[in-house]
Image (cartoon, grey):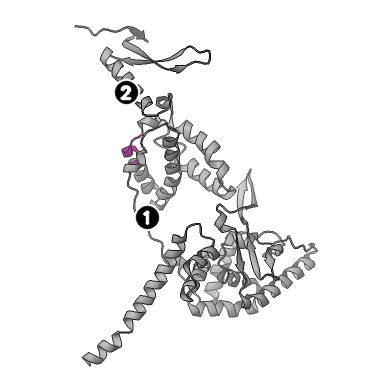
Amino acid sequence: MPKKTNFEANGSKYYRVTATIGKNPDGSAKRKPFYGKSKKEAENKRDEYMANIDRGLSVDFDKVVFRDIFKLWFDEVLKPTLAQSSIQRYETDYRLRIKNCVLSDMKLTEIKSIHLQSYYNSIVEKYSANTAHNTNKLIKNFFKYCVKDNMIIKNPLDAVTLPKTESKTGDNKVLSQQDIDTLIQASSADGDLFIFVFALFTGLRLGEILALTHNDIDFENNIIKVSKSVTYLTIDGEYKPVVSTPKTNSSIRDVPILEQLKAPLLRHISNEKEKHFKLGVLFKNKNMLFSSEVCTYKDRQNVRKSLARTQKRLGMQVTTFHALRHSFCTLLAQKGVPLKTASVLMGHSNISVTAQIYTHVDNQELKKGIDKLSSLFDERTA
């Protein structure tokens, strides 16, 4: 017996039912059609849709395509909250791994956990586990927004297992006391190395250091005012420095100047003035504290490369620039500075970040304490 239908399109017959889902601008009822090969199939689609509406989803939830809504969210919701440097980083993630990914043409309601799991697995195969985690930062925020905006009921990421990230090798290892002494001694003879000593004993991030002006050094109150960061970005085809305010309020802080840092800091400022004079560049207090050879902003990549060259030349362990900041926090822990105080000095938005470093130091001290018992054991077994 042939199935009953009441609608025909493109030579095919369907059964159509409708449901009222709201009102049009003129006040008339807004109706939505549902199609099936039978009356029961069409009604099931209608009932499922209306149940989702009753659960709080928006009326057009079934039409939203991942590609379109992600781009709209990225431009209108996320971008206004980001610093320029973060925008460029996230735009790269979007362009390379999200814009034309396997999810792009799927409706939002069709995306299940298994689709996302497969998507992340493919990123690991092509790039790395760390890249998958970085991409997930964007995807996670996007789906949280979709749930909040009633486009989906449940976040499909809840059942996704991210791949384990590769642990980094010792690039960020804490500087040894010998390497610290070597760096201090070398900087006293070579003023260009002072930026590394400055980083080691202030704990500032590289971008924060390069954004400092002479106005930010307050010798009267013995503090460094940290309120901005700088990075070089390619904007409209031009590679240029971009100064921005920190992402979090905790990064805006005053860091006391170590007493032993004052004299070399004053020498550095004197050298900066002399460099400006020789180049015929007017020296102003709003000029960069650490300027390039031509009195412009230093490029952070050049500073990092300079550190690596310096460490090799001096026979030090080669580390990242960030290791200087990590070493500063470790020194605070070793000297018994309270965790909360160290967190403020570091400008950490979450004290747990500081606590991880402190815990590592505590574990080292515990091991030293246990090792001290070895002599007793040796005496009894001699």
The location of residue 32, given as percent across then percent down, is: 40, 16
Q: Quadrant of residue 19?
A: top left
Q: Residue at x 29, y 85 (%)?
A: 374
Q: Residue at x 64, y 79 (%)?
A: 189
Numbered badge on residue 165: 1
Q: Is residue 67 highlighted in magenta?
A: no
In the picture, the quarter occupied by the C terminus is: bottom left
| Residue that label 2 marks | 48
Q: Amino acid at mark 1?
A: Thr
Question: Is 113 on the left or on the right of 354, as rendered?
Answer: left
Q: Amino acid at mark 2?
A: Glu
Q: Secondary structure at mark 2?
A: helix
Q: In the rendered view, tell whether residue 19 sits above or below residue 200.
A: above
| 1 and 2 marks in contact (CB < 8 Å) | no
Is residue 38 visible to the viewer in this orientation of the structure?
A: no
The location of residue 184, given as percent across then percent down, is: 58, 78
Q: In the rendered view, tell whether residue 68 sits above or below residue 175.
A: above
In the picture, the quarter occupied by the N terminus is: top left
Which span of residues is magenta-colored?
A: 111-117
- Sequence-wise, which precedes: disc 1 or disc 2? 2
